[in-house]
Image (cartoon, rainbow, N blue to C red):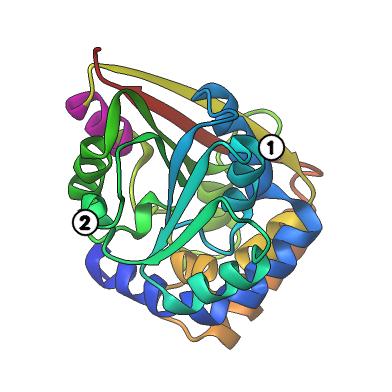
Amino acid sequence: MVDSSELKQLVKSAFDESIPYYISFEEKYRLYAFLAREMSIISDIKEGSMVCDVLGGTGASTRILSELVGDSGHVFSINFSDKLIDYVQRELAKAENVDFIVGDVTRLADYLPKKVDGVVFNSSIYLAESISDTIESAKNVLIDEGAVSLTYAVGIFDMDGNDLMHRIKLDIDPMISTKPLIQPNIIRRLLDDYFDYTNHYNISVVVNHDFMKEFFLIPTESILLFPELNYEERVKRINTIFKELEKITEKINFKWGLSVACSAK
């Protein structure tokens, strides 16, 4: 049995090899760009904003933020992976309003030259070594009116709202792990503890089986399903799961949470 700290290390160790998978998936489906736009609207990121994009993966959210803040704003993209930062820096080489930083996300103040209007975590907070320390670090680099915003996966459901992960475990593959790296309610509770005002939203992304299978075939995502198996074995099981899942539901509701938090002026 793999505990949560071991699971987090497994996911982080697979991140560099997952880069081409994330790139291919995002080019095809634009999931993370969509989530970044939703997050930016809710947290009022706009022309002239100063924003820190934390653990921004292959740069989908950094690109959106760079476009939104414009020449008068600035984005600080920070990650623990130098390979990811190198890739994003090459992809956004023409973006003069972005700084690319390899660093410890529990110490954001050590890397930012000034306080910012917003700190965003686009499906990334679960990668932080300490989630509470990272949220506190984000709060400390905000201006008085600034906000922290996060997106995080909640689960997959059929169109009647039934939890498909539990259905898979019961009827298709009892070996699958249905436990997320971090529960959404823990993220929300931490934000409620650290900030004066929080709002929590639900986002439904209705997808087909190809979308969902390609998502779970990303090495880091597949580890969350079968942490004790090697990648080849995970692929075999995921392919079998989706052959059976097509008999159960035509569409999948991929639910996400979006939380925004700020402190009193």
> Residue at left 24%, top 61%?
129
Does residue 97 lie above or below 241 as drawn?
above
> Residue at left 76%, top 64%?
243
**Looking at the rendering, in which quadrant would you find the N terminus?**
bottom left
Residue 156 screen position, x and y as percent: 59, 44
226 left or right, relative to 231: left
For mark 2, what is the residue? Answer: 110
The foreground one among 242 and 217 is 217
Q: In which quarter of the image is residue 121?
A: top left
Type of amino acid at the residue the image marks with label 2: Asp
Does residue 109 lie above or below 22 as drawn?
above
Q: Quadrant of residue 238?
A: bottom right
Residue 16 screen position, x and y as percent: 50, 79
- Does residue 222 show up? yes
> Residue at left 28%, top 41%?
138
Q: Distance between the residues labelled 2 and 1?
A: 36 Å
> Residue at left 49%, top 31%?
258
110 left or right, relative to 149: left
The foreground one among 61 and 124 is 61
Label 1 sits on a secondary structure element that is: strand
**Looking at the rendering, in which quadrant would you find the C terminus?**
top left
Q: What stretch is highlighted in magenta?
A: 186-194
Residue 205 screen position, x and y as percent: 69, 37
Q: Residues within 10 Å of mark 2 (few under 14, many from 20)?
A: few
The overriding secondary structure of the stretch rendered in magenta is helix
For mark 1, what is the residue? Answer: 205
- Does residue 240 show up? no
